Amino acid sequence: MPFKPADNPKCPKCGKSVYAAEERVAGGLKWHKMCFKCGLCQKLLDSTNCTEHEGELFCKMCHARKFGPKGYGFGGGAGCLSMDAGEHLKADGQN
């Protein structure tokens, strides 16, 4: 009987095998420690500040900015008015 190595899960960010000593789990997927960072600001994440959206990781602040409610009453108001259309939040030309 030939030797068959164990199948290790693949990191969704880099596609390489993730071993138990280096894994971080979010969204039912296993990530490398260095791949476990926000998709917008590149901040390293941990279990307390991580949010997953459609297979991509975000810190809670970037997730709220990109996918949270918009408009008056949601952290805005006359003191926070902005003409920003959010172009800097679009990753690779996507919404």
Image (cartoon, rainbow, N blue to C red):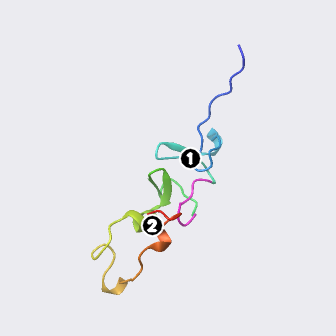
Are there few (<14), some (14-19), or many (20+) residues within 10 Å of tag 1? some
Whether residue 14 is situated above or below residue 41 in the rendered picture:
above
Which residue was labeled with disc 2? 61
What is the quadrant of the C terminus in the image?
Answer: bottom left
In the rendered image, residue 37 lying in the magenta stretch gets the answer yes
In the rendered image, residue 83 lying in the magenta stretch gets the answer no
Residue at disc 1, secondary structure? loop
The first of marks 1 and 2 along the sequence is 1
**Magenta segment:** 35-42
Q: Residue 89: image x %, image y %?
A: 47, 69
Q: Amino acid at mark 1?
A: Pro
The disc label shown at residue 62, or none: none
**Residue at 42% across, 79% down:** 84
Residue at disc 2, secondary structure? helix
The disc label shown at residue 12, or none: 1
Q: Main secondary structure of the magenta part?
A: loop
Q: Amino acid at mark 2?
A: Met
Q: Residue 19: image x %, image y %?
A: 64, 39
In the foreground, 84 or 61: 84
